[in-house]
Image: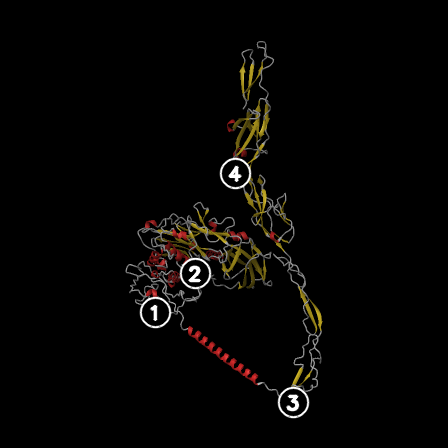
Amino acid sequence: MLSFRMQRGQAGGSVVLLLLLGGYVVCDTESSDYSDAEVLPDSYPSAPAEPLPEFLLEPEDAFIVKNRPVQLRCRASPATQIYFKCNGEWVNQNDHITRESLDQVTGLVVREVDILVSRTQVEELFGLEDYWCQCVAWSSAGTTKSIRAYVRIAYLRKNFEQEPLGREVRLEQEVLLQCRPPEGMPAAEVDWLKNEDTIDPSQDSNFLITIDNDLIIKQARLSDTANYTCLARNVVAKRRSSTATVIVYVSGGWSSWTEWSECNTKCGRGWQRRTRSCTNPAPLNGGAFCEGPPFQRVTCTTLCPVDGGWTEWAKWSACSTECTHWRSRECLAPAPRNGGKHCSGSMMESKNCTEGLCARTLAPDMGVAVYAGLVGALLLCVILVLCVGILACRRRCSHFHGDITDSSSALTAAFHPGNYKPPRQDNPHPLHPSAPPDLTATAGAFRSPLFSLQQGVNDSHKIPMTTSPLLDPLPSLKIKVYNSSTLSSLEIPADMCSADGEILSLKSVGTGGRERQFHSHTLSRDPGLSTSATLGHLGGRLTIPSTGVSLLVPPGTIPQGKFYEMYLIISKWEKTTLPSEGSQTVLSPAVSCGPSALLLNRPVVLTLPHCAQLDTPTPDWTLTLKTQTHQGAWEEVLTVGEESLSSPCYLQLEEECCHVLMEQLGTYGLVGQSCPPQPACKRLQLALFAPRAPCLSLDYSLRIYCIHDTPHALKEVLDLERSLGGVLLEDTKPLLFKDSYHNLRLSIHDIPHTHWRSKLLAKYQEIPFYHIWSGSQRPLHCTFSLERSSLVVSQLSCKLCVRQVEGEGQIFQLHTDIQETLPPHSPHPSAGSCLPTSQIGPYAFRLPESIRQKICTSLDAPSARGCDWRLLARSLGFDRYLNYFATKPSPTGVLLDLWEACHQGDADLVSLATALEEMGKSEVLVVMTTDGDC
């Protein structure tokens, strides 16, 4: 800063102007009268002269990103003071941050100054010139100014001025993809992505990025068929253009001609041909087929074959010493030629020439040898026949002495009657695993018949269960049946799921009614996508019909005496963020179960349907379970195959669904990504819809939906089309969609052009690969708009093809009358469509509590032979990560809960009984029922 001070002199009114500059005082006197002033000396002593300040660091241009201020810095030597001047005005001294040091080499003072420039300062500047700042440095020799540094606000617009467009090009053709990035400050830098990988022209010389940010493919190769994206970025943000699909096609080329075939006639005039194939190269990616005929034909003439003929017999020869004479003939009348047949028959003939008077006799010793050989051969044949007969007889008798396999009962109380035959250890031919159970085996007699409790209370028919050696020593048993007016452990048969709705909707009554409102109104619930029930210590099961989503709450999960209003909700896709990121794909619906703050005594089991194809021999999926936080972000819970002791969940995978054991309720979803080197496949289903008849307009549209192969996804589309007035024309068709970056192509063919025309100008429609794989847009569909020639036309026949480029596909053969009212088409019903939305109490489970306790008591304790809960887990296929179960108070109880969830829609108790039988745990197959047990 500059400081001025005026001082009036005492002599003659002289004025002394003191200029304080950098700590030095420069005096200038002015007076109109010098008579009374003292005479000034000719010179003053002075310090050594300093050079002008020299800037070691000058301020640089900067950009303000969002609201973060920028720092400007300059450094000069020698400098007694440094100040910033911005837009012609001095910056306040308090806004400077000054640091001073001494140069060890020159001994001069080095001064460094920083200031901060905020977004508000820049925005307050009016005018055409940008906001600028510069440094001014002082020394005893004078001042020096730095260069100007401009401060601008950084930004990047959202829309590209020009986006790349997809193309179909022939092999080795040059391709130009243009891109003009959005306007920005500073100007955006452009990168090109090929299938999400950055293109580096230094690594692949076939690519060239011009100064105008255009991408040039010098010679298109088959490997250049891909999705190309223009990526613009600066210090503020990144922007992606729409994806441009480049398809490199190959037109077909003829192979070389084959050799001429043989003449098609063996005699006279005919023709012969040669062929070529359109395989050099074969047409690819929609390339043109070869022009010209695939074969050529020319005439030919073949000499007719002449079959040979015998000449007349020659005269008989003279009689030889062996009493025979002979005669001959030749194949020369005519001789065979041109491939003709040779003469058949013998060339020579002989006979006795003495009319039997010169007969030859055998020697005596030779006759004996001949007869002995004949007798020996006859005896050998008789012996072989006897041996074969004995073997056949033994084999026939063996069928009446086979092993008798015992047919043991599955379980008592709630076990369904059914026979199963575990293979015996001494039987070398065990039953085939796919063979159906033997239902014709007769049951042996035993003391005190045992009856199944599956029948209704008023049902007088009692079905005795089959016996096994395990049941022989049983004493007389008492069976106690409770009527329907009390809360019992009877199971509700499958045929009662529609008739006894009042029983299925029964809720337990207790004193905890004041706690039922806990978390009951926190989420909006769609009746078709949610369910709720009041559950207590006895547990229960929540099921959303026709979606495959359910929640199993085992007994003892909720503390004794407590009741909670528990809910299960499928989140709508438009109201939630997706759990996938990067190359991940959504495989299941996002499901919320709660209350989320509920403390559980044991894990619950959440069942989610998924669309991952899992029947490949090698693992090609990396599956991850995610949960949504209260802030809406998704966090990874566990990755299948990478579990550890800190994993809070266990995930059991099946072909069409997964079961999650967890102790923290919340929102969950399953995602996955391909596991190199094999690309993964998603199971999709295709649904064809049309307007509901009768159609009163000339226009007619066909809509094909491409959705996940899950019950929930199909239910969502059916509800949507029902609101739009659409009807499902055919059963849905499955489609495997591979992670290959290829789009889904849809086309319509064989339209009767005499009465119909298509409004679609292109040959086909495509759904981009990323839209399907990410699952970000639901539901995806394409519409084919048709127009009929008149209102009289009602018949429509056509073919709709849906396939992934270079992948699998499906064809819809459509034959319909658009004026005929079709009955509502029901797609494949889910197995659990008859199950109620909620089941409360013991009848929600396949296993009664008494049997469960018996199994847990027998298997929870570790066994030296390994015949404990670990062997049960291996038998049931739940042994992927045994440490999860080992950390629970009752590992067997958690295994049985998981088994209950896996067998929700069936009564496959035989599998559990077979597993226990193979383990040698015969004592747990039967539970003695007393007066106090159910």
Identify the element where label 2 is drawn: loop
The type of residue carrying mark 4 is Lys
Query: Residue at point 55% right, 31% down?
Result: 73
Please state if 886 lies on the left or on the right of 768 as rendered: left
Q: Position of residue 918 (x, y in %)?
A: 39, 61
Q: Earlier in the sequence, mark 3 or mark 2?
A: 3
Query: Residue at point 55% right, 82% down?
Result: 369
Which residue was labeled with disc 3?
354
Identify the element where label 1 is drawn: loop
The type of residue carrying mark 2 is Ala
Nearer to the camera, 172 or 179: 172
Which residue was labeled with disc 4?
66
Q: Are marks 1 and 2 in contact (CB under 8 Å)?
A: no
Please state if 3 lies on the left or on the right of 901 as rendered: right
Q: Earlier in the sequence, mark 3 or mark 4?
A: 4
Q: Position of residue 367 (x, y in %)?
A: 56, 84
Q: Is residue 159 above or below residue 609?
A: above
Task: Identify the mark at residue 582; answer none if there is no mark.
Answer: none
